[in-house]
Image: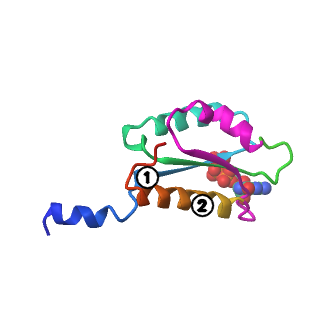
Amino acid sequence: MRQDKLRPLWRQYLSYSDALIYVVDSMDRDRIGVAREEFQAVVEDPLMLNSAILVLANKQDMKGSMKPPEVGQRLGLYDLRNRTSRVVGACALTGEGLHEGLGWLAATLKDAHAWGSAVRF
Ligand SMILES: Nc1nc2c(ncn2[C@@H]2O[C@H](COP(=O)(O)OP(=O)(O)OP(=O)(O)O)[C@@H](O)[C@H]2O)c(=O)[nH]1
């Protein structure tokens, strides 16, 4: 099949660059700076400029873990301009936060596709 016939069909599916899910170890204060550098490099990648960003602040069940707003601040999430993002507390052992986080992402992507636009407000 020719490429131009494939394209409209393809747009009904999500491209990997539509969404970024970034998981942070909220207990690891020593490496949050490295996580920030990695995170910033990914969000600034030209392929990712229109992606919705979900940050999962993992290990919220552990005493002393960074809370979601602190994780967002340390990653530089709140300094990003024209991006749709959310940081949600999570626990990989219980699945806490996954429903909220992935639910938000699904609703965000559905809205963006319904409007036929990139996820950028
Ligand atoms: N209490 C708790 N433990 C977790 C959670 N997520 C992962 N772990 C545990 O933490 C340990 C290390 O897991 P991860 O941090 O995911 O592993 P990793 O990314 O390969 O390790 P690092 O690169 O060293 O962070 C394992 O024993 C996991 O079971 C969580 O949400 N809560």
Q: Residue furthest left?
A: 2
Name the residue located 21 percent from the left edge and 65 percent from the top edge. Answer: 6
Name the residue located 17 percent from the left edge and 66 percent from the top edge. Answer: 5
* 35 or 116, nearer to the observer: 116
Q: How many marks?
A: 2
The part of the chain drawn in magenta is 67-96
Q: Which residue is mark 1?
A: 18
Name the residue located 81 percent from the left edge and 54 percent from the top edge. Answer: 61
Q: Residue furthest front?
A: 115
Q: Residue furthest right?
A: 63
- Membership of 78 in magenta stretch: yes
- Quarter of the figure with residue 80: top right
Name the residue located 73 percent from the left edge and 61 percent from the top edge. Answer: 96
Q: Amino acid at mark 2?
A: Leu
- Dot 2 lies on which element? helix
> Residue 54: percent from the left, percent from the top?
58, 49
Residue 102 numbered mark, or none: 2
**Earlier sequence position, callout 1 versus callout 2:** 1
Rendered position, 7 above or below 48: below
* 85 or 55, nearer to the observer: 85
Categorize mark 2 by other alpha carbons within 10 Å: few (<14), some (14-19), many (20+). Answer: some
Q: CA distance from mark 1 to mark 2?
A: 13 Å
> Residue 102: percent from the left, percent from the top?
60, 60
Residue 64 numbered mark, or none: none
